[in-house]
Image (cartoon, coloured by chain):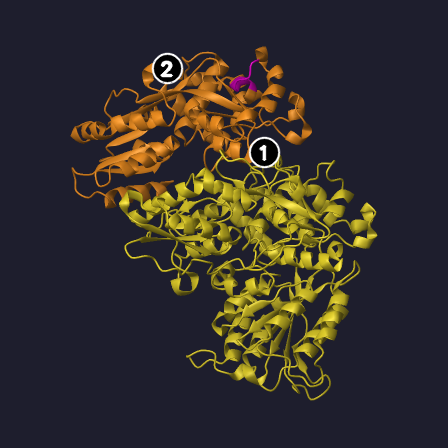
């Protein structure tokens, strides 16, 4: 991780053509093609580095001095998580306050229809959501109306310790378990929650790419159900397996916001002027919605709680 | 433990070797690797694992002449070169040395599995270097690891109605009753085919799966698991059923296909760990997956079926790794990204399916030839085994070097007069280079391997048989490595080449002293044609070899010939190898002999 971070910093240095001319944008890899399009859109003007949200966060959380970025395109509240971690270390914030979301997308679960049909009747209130998936996770399908050949129940989401969206999905799942968003880190010590959390997170295996893509290309062998954004779930709608999958909106609803967090001062402002409009357009083209098109309030716990969940997820996989 | 450098030196070789010799060929310069780059274009060199080189070459050709090859108005020109996954990993670990022999440093690396990228990054990290394989690389096509079995054998263990797992297969492999325990004593012992995991993704995946079966786990394999005595015992038990290793799965599939034609498919090998695509190719009559010009594929009499282990399996995910290497510049990155988009395009992903792979783009449906008619099941597998952490993967490779089946190998070296001919401009003769290669290859054997040294030339011995001379008898090489090396260094060229006599006699000697616990083999290095006036009957030799290699009660001794120099009789050597279900290796360029020797030793 450290070596990777140094390599990224080195690359940023190399490409710094002349201070004041090349703006430095880090783009979270889970935004997919949007990052690639931005990278190609401003040659010689904006240097775009694509990396995981976790890598960026870990680097910026401890960096003393020039953060060597002018802006970060990522799911909210990752920038707040970074600045919260810096505050705990008595370091100044990296990012300027404010900045409206560029795009929004509800969080959804995409599941194979036959798996959902088997599992749903066994769920509390007959409703398939994260609470039920966490309880069933890694248990034999035979306990849940399924067939022995299906093996164990395999829910999935992107790596909550590293992926911008993956952490939000885990946040949504946690809110669903507790039934509220105003959580404190003490709540995470609840024994029942810990059992459920371990059940959900411990079997979670790292995915080379997007878990949804893996589910759709490798079939039921990979995952039975995957949490992601509605925007990405468009892939399921376009896929050859579209008739075999179903989309579920967990209750309570939650959504992911994409923000362009910029550093205070002229460079950050200038970067925002250059890329914000285009980034919003690209996001909408990728299936994200204008912020106003989805109900306000993202239904997620606080940045501090999400950071604590990130740490718990890391421990669970050890 | 076998040194890692084994895979490095192999980088040069396999295009020169097994491809021409019934083995396929899993590394080295493939089509397109040396294509001239049009003026003004950036060369986007791509190293790809062998099973997809034809497909990628075709896609690159289409891309290079398309508008997509001009991202930002600048021209990109993709050149595809065949490099086996293990070799690519080893070369990148070393910074991709010797471009003259290994090909240009790649901008894109596509091994068969992302596991190789993880091992690469782990080894770089251990050397204090930054990662080269990027995280989150997308698969552009997929194929699961399966256990290929002749249909009657699969049916005998319950296929297709009973789910079959690695543990079931491996228990059968260790059952002393062999197929007799399943009501088929005529099939003899259960024989497992498995490639060397240092070279082959199928071999690596099968070895990982084997450890999972030993632990009862399906994920989170740890170094502690590997160290447990019962896991070690299980692994050694499985390895003991292996017929031989080798660098590429087509060696097994080609031999299986030839045996099928002779009606002996069921006694050659019972099961081989291969990719699903290979089962399709085999059943279509194209066992090595390469269609030669004019070739008319003929389906086998006994088809293979793919068993998808009930515990789960691993996918070869063919990642598209745009290397974060110091030799890759921005323009090359731009061209590489354009090619990746091109490859992911649904039109091109449909070509992927035509080649027997599952598409990496979810928008494209699977279809013919991935269907039950070809022995595979598009609805399988139902479960996946977790790819272990990089450190665990590295430990698996180390342990395999210790646990693999021991070998009993007779090195038979031609010291005929022609071996005294100049081989390079450094003043080395062919024999000089062969001696260096043989001495170097001795380090690749593990201490418990029994190795003997025999030389041959007409009238080399004062007494009968006069055609060959045993310099070192069989014994554990750990105790006599230096003694063998010393004898090899002292060899001098003498007279003619009694090839047929020494091949037959060496084969017979190993059969007479056969050790059922080991891989029994002859490595026969020769630079010429048979020159023995007392024995010119190659057909009798082949008939005898074949007869002794067939049947459930046979004591399989493999002859791995090395055709050394341009005058070697490659066609006869290839037939000798095929008669004993082995593979011949081509070192017609003497400067490749070190690499070829190393490739041959990968069979043990």
Q: What is the x, y in percent for residue B122?
A: 45, 47
Q: Which residue is mark 2?
A: A294
Quarter of the rendering containing residue B515? bottom right
In this orientation, does residue B409 appear? no
Q: Which chain is drawn using yellow?
A: B
Chain of the residue under the numbered disc 1 shown in the image: A
Residue at (64% x, 55% y) in the render: B253
Image disc number at residue A122: none
Q: Nearer the viewer, mark 2 or mark 1?
A: 2
Label 2 SS: loop
Image disc number at residue A221: 1
- Rendered-image quadrant of the N terminus of chain B: bottom right
**Chain A appears in which tint?**
orange
Q: What is the x, y in percent for residue B13?
A: 50, 64
Q: Which region is colored magenta?
A: A127-132
> Going by the image, does A96 lie left or right of B207?
left
């Amino acid at each position: 991780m450290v070596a990777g971070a140094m390599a990224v910093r080195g690359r940023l240095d190399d490409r710094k053509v002349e201070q004041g001319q090349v703006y430095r944008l880090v783009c979270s890899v889970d935004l997919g093609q949007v990052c690639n399009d931005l990278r190609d859109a401003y040659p010689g003007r904006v240097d775009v580095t694509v990396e995981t949200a976790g890598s960026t966060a870990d680097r910026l959380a401890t960096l003393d001095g020039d953060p060597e970025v002018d802006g970060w395109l990522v799911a909210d509240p990752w920038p707040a998580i970074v600045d919260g971690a810096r505050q705990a270390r008595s370091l100044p914030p990296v990012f300027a306050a404010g900045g409206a979301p560029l795009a929004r997308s509800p969080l959804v679960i995409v599941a194979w229809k036959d798996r959902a049909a088997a599992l749903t009747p066994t769920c509390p209130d007959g409703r398939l959501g994260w609470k039920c998936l966490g309880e069933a996770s890694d248990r034999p399908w035979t306990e849940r109306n399924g067939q022995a050949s299906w093996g164990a129940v395999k829910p999935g989401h992107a790596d909550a310790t590293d992926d911008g969206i993956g952490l939000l999905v885990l946040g949504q799942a946690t809110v669903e378990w507790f039934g509220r968003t105003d959580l404190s880190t003490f709540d995470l010590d609840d024994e029942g929650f810990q059992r459920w959390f371990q059940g959900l997170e411990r079997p979670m295996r790292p995915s080379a790419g997007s878990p949804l893509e893996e589910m759709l290309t490798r079939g039921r062998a990979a995952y039975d159900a995957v949490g992601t954004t509605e925007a990405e779930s468009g892939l399921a709608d376009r896929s050859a397996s579209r008739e075999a999958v179903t989309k579920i909106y967990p209750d309570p609803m939650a959504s992911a916001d994409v923000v362009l967090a910029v550093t205070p001062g002229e460079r950050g402002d200038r970067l925002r002027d250059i890329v914000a409009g285009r980034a919003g357009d690209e996001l909408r083209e990728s299936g994200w919605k204008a912020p106003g098109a989805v109900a306000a309030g993202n239904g997620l716990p606080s940045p501090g709680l999400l950071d604590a969940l990130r740490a718990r997820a890391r421990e669970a996989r050890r | 433990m076998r040194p890692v450098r084994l895979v490095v030196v192999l980088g040069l070789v396999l295009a020169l070797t097994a491809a021409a010799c019934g083995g396929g060929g899993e590394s080295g310069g493939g089509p397109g690797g040396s294509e001239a780059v049009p003026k003004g274009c950036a060369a986007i060199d791509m190293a790809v694992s062998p099973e997809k080189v034809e497909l990628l070459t075709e896609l690159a050709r289409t891309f290079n002449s398309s508008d997509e090859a001009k991202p930002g108005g600048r021209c990109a020109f993709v050149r595809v070169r065949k490099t086996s996954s293990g070799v690519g990993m080893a070369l990148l670990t070393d910074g991709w040395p010797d471009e003259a022999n290994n090909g240009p440093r790649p901008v894109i690396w596509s091994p068969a599995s992302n596991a190789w990228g993880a091992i690469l990054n782990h080894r770089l990290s251990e050397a204090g270097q930054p990662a080269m394989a990027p995280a989150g690389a997308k698969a552009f096509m997929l194929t699961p690891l399966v256990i290929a079995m002749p249909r009657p054998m699969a049916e005998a263990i319950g296929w297709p109605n009973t789910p079959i797992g690695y543990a079931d297969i491996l228990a059968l492999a260790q059952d002393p009753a062999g197929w007799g325990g399943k009501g088929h004593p005529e099939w003899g012992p259960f024989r497992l085919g498995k490639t060397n995991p240092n070279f082959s993704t199928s071999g690596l995946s099968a070895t990982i799966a084997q450890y999972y079966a030993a632990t009862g786990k399906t994920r989170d394999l740890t170094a502690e698991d590997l160290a447990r005595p019962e896991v070690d015992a299980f692994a050694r038990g499985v390895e003991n059923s292996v017929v031989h290793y080798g660098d590429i799965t087509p060696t097994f599939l080609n031999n299986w296909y030839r045996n099928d034609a002779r009606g002996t498919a069921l006694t050659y090998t019972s099961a081989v760990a291969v990719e699903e695509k290979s089962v399709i190719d085999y059943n279509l009559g194209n066992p090595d997956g390469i269609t030669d010009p004019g070739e008319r594929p003929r389906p086998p009499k006994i088809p293979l079926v793919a068993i998808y282990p009930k515990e789960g399996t691993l996918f070869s995910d063919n990642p598209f790794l745009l290397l974060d290497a110091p030799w890759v510049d921005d323009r090359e990155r731009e061209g590489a990204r354009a090619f990746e988009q091109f490859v992911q395009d649904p039109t091109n992903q449909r070509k992927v399916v035509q080649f027997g792979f599952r598409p990496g783009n979810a928008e494209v449906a699977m279809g013919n030839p991935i269907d039950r008619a070809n022995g595979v099941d598009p609805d399988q597998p139902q479960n996946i085994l977790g790819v272990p952490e990089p450190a665990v993967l590295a430990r698996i490779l180390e342990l395999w070097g210790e646990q693999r089946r021991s070998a009993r190998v007779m090195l038979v070296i031609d010291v005929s007069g022609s071996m005294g001919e100049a081989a390079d401009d450094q003043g080395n003769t062919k024999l000089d280079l062969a001696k260096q290669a043989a001495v170097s290859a001795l380090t690749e054997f593990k201490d418990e391997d029994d190795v003997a040294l025999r030389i041959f030339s007409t009238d080399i011995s004062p007494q009968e048989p006069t055609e060959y001379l045993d310099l070192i008898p069989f014994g554990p090489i750990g105790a006599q490595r230096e003694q063998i090396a010393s004898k090899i260094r002292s060899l001098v060229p003498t007279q003619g080449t009694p090839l047929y006599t020494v091949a037959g006699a060496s084969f017979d000697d190993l059969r007479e002293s056969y050790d059922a616990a080991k891989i029994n083999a002859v490595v026969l290095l020769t630079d010429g044609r048979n020159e023995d006036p007392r024995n010119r009957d190659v057909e009798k030799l082949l008939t005898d070899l074949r007869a002794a290699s067939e049947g459930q009660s046979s004591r399989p001794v493999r002859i791995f010939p090395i055709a050394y120099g341009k005058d070697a009789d490659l066609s006869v050597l290839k037939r000798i190898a095929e008669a004993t279900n082995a593979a011949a290796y081509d070192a017609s360029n003497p400067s490749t002999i070190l690499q070829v020797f190393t490739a041959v030793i990968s069979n043990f």
